[in-house]
Image (spheres, rainbow, N blue to C red):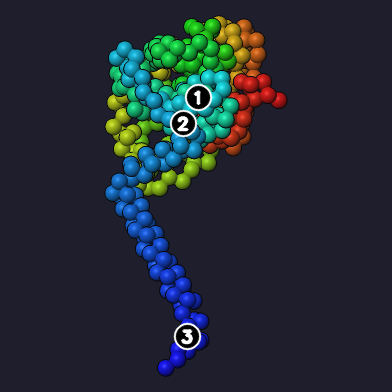
Amino acid sequence: MRADPDARAQSPRSTLRTLLLRRLKALGVLLLVIALGAGSAYLLAPGLLLRGDYALQSWQADLHTRTLQVGATHWVYYEGGKGPTLVLLHGFGGSRENWLPTARYLVRNFHLLIPDLPGYGASSPIPGADAGVHAQARRLAGFVDALKLQHFALAGHSMGGAIAGVYAAEHPDRVAALALLDTAGLPFRPNAFARAVAEGHNPFAYSDRAQFARFMRLIFARPPFVPARIADVLIARNVAAQPFLDATLARLRAPADADALVPVLPRLTMPVLGLWCNDDRVIDPSALDALRKGLVAAPQIGTSLLNGCGHMPIMEEPRATADALTRFLTGAP
């Protein structure tokens, strides 16, 4: 009996179709497993997803986690990039991860060092009463010495700006240029945030989702979407850190820290940039007036106002923030 030639001709096509269907089914099963795994992680281990997001952002910025022991203080920091060294300091209640969106653009032109300040993130815990601007500036000096940094640019956001300014005044030979972003340590036009702090409240404290949403509206002009279970992780961390944060804020609202930059501004002999968000509801942009007035010895003074962001330009407008820093620090037009 002779085989049907049409059947022989269709057989390879049928086999290919069957194989393709099997692979599509396998891919569908794999995607289902991934979706179920991600869903389970979101519900049961949202902290793992948050750490994964930070790891992805640091990988995209080509930043690597390093550690350093300086006396009794254990520092954890990011390092990456090539070019002139730029040290970046985060603000009150923050961590090195706050700088990741901006660092992605800065790493193209700078060798970045981004530490968790002691008491924050993964660095050593310290007593809140000993976490003021001047004490942290002294710890920063130990960090810089241990890394044998000789000449570098320094940028600080919010509380980190006050620390950076105090350090720069004490070590003008080390700091090639200084950038202060929505910085603390300067007088500014009173606002609701300042009044709350003066009355002993901590506007950065939150213990439930409603309070977290209010906090986000305080620091962002356009609060980013944060999934509920991720918000729960951030809420739990904030609650655990409250004793430290409350004690630190009490220290920061004392006159010596609240106006920490005022007496040191005349001693800043390096180029200084003041960069603010126009819609900052934490530290009003009027602080720029005190900054300009006090910088009597700086050879170059730059100021920049960014639109469309609140207290967190490094997260809300990372590209514009990186561009402003790069232009000032490199002298690019």
Q: Badge 3, how many Cα within 10 Å: few under 14, some, many 20+? A: few
Instruction: Check if mark 3's residue and mark 1's residue have beta carbons within 8 Å.
Output: no
Disc 2/disc 1 C-alpha distance (Å): 8 Å
- The residue that label 1 is drawn on is 112
Query: Looking at this view, is 9 or 17 the one in front?
Result: 9
- Residue at the image position 32 percent from the left and 35 percent from the top: 237
Quarter where residue 180 is shown: top right
- Residue at the image position 36 percent from the left and 19 percent from the top: 68
The answer to which of marks 2 and 1 sits earlier in the sequence is 2
- Residue at the image position 47 percent from the left and 89 percent from the top: 4
Q: Given the image, on which type of amino acid does mark 1 rest? A: Leu
Image quadrant for the C terminus?
top right
Image height of 31 relative to 145, above or below: below
The answer to which of marks 3 and 2 sits earlier in the sequence is 3
- The residue that label 3 is drawn on is 7
Q: Given the image, on which type of amino acid does mark 2 rest? A: Leu
Instruction: Check if mark 2's residue and mark 1's residue have beta carbons within 8 Å.
Output: yes
Image side of residue 185 versus residue 36, left or right: right
- The residue that label 2 is drawn on is 63
Q: Given the image, on which type of amino acid does mark 3 rest? A: Ala
